[in-house]
Image: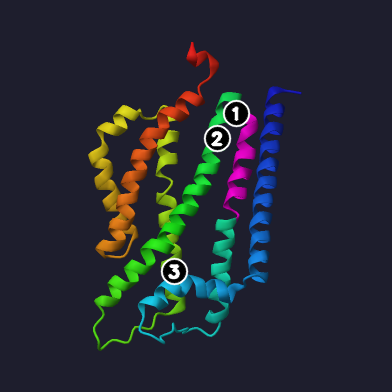
């Protein structure tokens, strides 16, 4: 067997392994979706997600559906999104299982904690957005609504808003993981990151202004946690680097 043939077989085996991991990740999301469809059901899931919006509306108000199939499709989409979030640890585990065989023992000590922390931080970002941000944003916006306007949000527009906000908060809560990876890979040092702290703070507010509605409440609610998580990353990065060092690096 030539070296070129061996390389092709290795590449194909990696593709097969990647396909298997993607299928297993999909199965996990599908299983979570089936469970959520059976209990509590798409309707209750959407009612739970819509609670912060309804709490900010006048008593007795409801959302509207302008599409014929919207009352069916929107709760189903929400259920699929929640299923993805619930299955996120399983999805990240499949990613770890795919890359683990190519890692040294000291590198594996870094990857598994990162997989766990990534899952926890993403879910924490989504929970923070729902329990803390939504209620304050909707009340803030409602206070500026003129009395001549009847606020009746469309469920599809609300779905788009919720999905974009949840994904934005979930992704930005990964800041500590990004910092740790950058430092461990040697792309940037902790000292360098500390020296650019003012620029990182400005960047956090710029990102918050772009991905959130144009109100101060939601922008501050995203920018301030990003700054704090950046500081957390600076604290954790040296610890992860020390734990994941190769034996010869200690010499």
SS for callout 3:
helix
The residue beneath circle 2 is: 111
Task: Report which residue position mark 1 lands on.
Answer: 103
Dominant secondary structure of the residues highlighted in magenta in the image: helix
Q: How crowded is mark 1: few (under 14 residues within 10 Å), some or many (20 or more)?
A: few
Residue at image position (53%, 85%) is: 68
Q: Are marks 1 and 3 in contact (CB under 8 Å)?
A: no
Segment tinted magenta in the rendering? 87-104
Q: Where is residue 58 in the image (x, y as percent from the top left)?
A: 35, 84
Residue 148, quarter of the rendered image: bottom left
Mark 3–mark 2 CB contact (< 8 Å):
no
- Callouts 2 and 1 close, C-beta under 8 Å: yes
Q: Is residue 98 above or below residue 57?
A: above
Closest to the observer, 81 or 1: 81
Q: Answer few, some or many: residues within 10 Å of disc 2's Cα (few below 14, many 20 plus, some between 14 and 19).
A: many
Please report the residue visible at 37 percent of the width from the left and 68 percent of the height from the top: 135
Is 10 placed left or right of 47 in the picture? right
The image shows residue 50 at horizontal and vertical percentages of: 46, 74
Q: Earlier in the sequence, mark 3 or mark 2?
A: 2
Q: Earlier in the sequence, mark 1 or mark 3?
A: 1
Judge whether residue 185 can be spotted in this image.
Answer: no
> Is 119 positioned to the left or the right of 213 in the image?
right
Residue 218 lies, with reference to residue 193, above or below; the image says: below
Distance from disc 2 to disc 1, alpha carbons, whole Å, reads: 9 Å
| Outermost residue, bottom side | 148
Q: What element carries label 2?
A: helix
The residue carrying mark 3 is 160
Q: Quadrant of residue 167?
A: bottom left
**Does residue 97 show up magenta in the picture?**
yes
The residue at 46%/64% (across/down) is 163
């Amino acid at each position: 067997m030539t070296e070129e043939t061996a390389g092709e077989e290795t590449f194909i085996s990696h593709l097969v392994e990647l396909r298997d991991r993607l299928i297993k990740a999909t199965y996990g999301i599908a299983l979570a979706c089936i469970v959520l469809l059976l209990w509590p059901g798409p309707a209750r899931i959407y009612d739970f997600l819509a609670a912060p919006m309804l709490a900010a509306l006048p008593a007795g108000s409801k959302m509207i559906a302008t599409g014929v199939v919207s009352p069916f499709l929107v709760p189903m989409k929400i259920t699929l999104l929640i299923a993805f979030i619930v299955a996120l640890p399983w999805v990240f585990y499949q990613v770890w299982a795919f890359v683990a065989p190519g890692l040294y023992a000291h590198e594996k000590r870094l990857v598994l904690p990162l997989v766990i922390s990534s899952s926890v931080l993403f879910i924490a970002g989504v929970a923070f957005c729902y329990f803390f941000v939504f209620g304050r944003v909707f009340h803030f916006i409602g206070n500026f609504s003129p009395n001549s306007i009847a606020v009746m949000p469309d469920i599809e527009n609300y779905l788009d808003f919720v999905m974009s906000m949840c994904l934005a908060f979930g992704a930005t809560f990964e800041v500590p993981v990004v910092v740790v990876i950058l430092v461990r890979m040697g792309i940037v040092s902790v000292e360098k990151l500390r020296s650019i702290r003012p620029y990182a703070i400005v960047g956090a507010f710029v990102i918050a202004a772009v991905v959130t509605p144009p109100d101060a409440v939601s922008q501050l609610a995203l920018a301030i946690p990003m700054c704090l998580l950046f500081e957390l990353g600076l604290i954790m990065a040296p610890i992860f680097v020390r734990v994941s060092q190769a034996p010869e690096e200690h010499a």
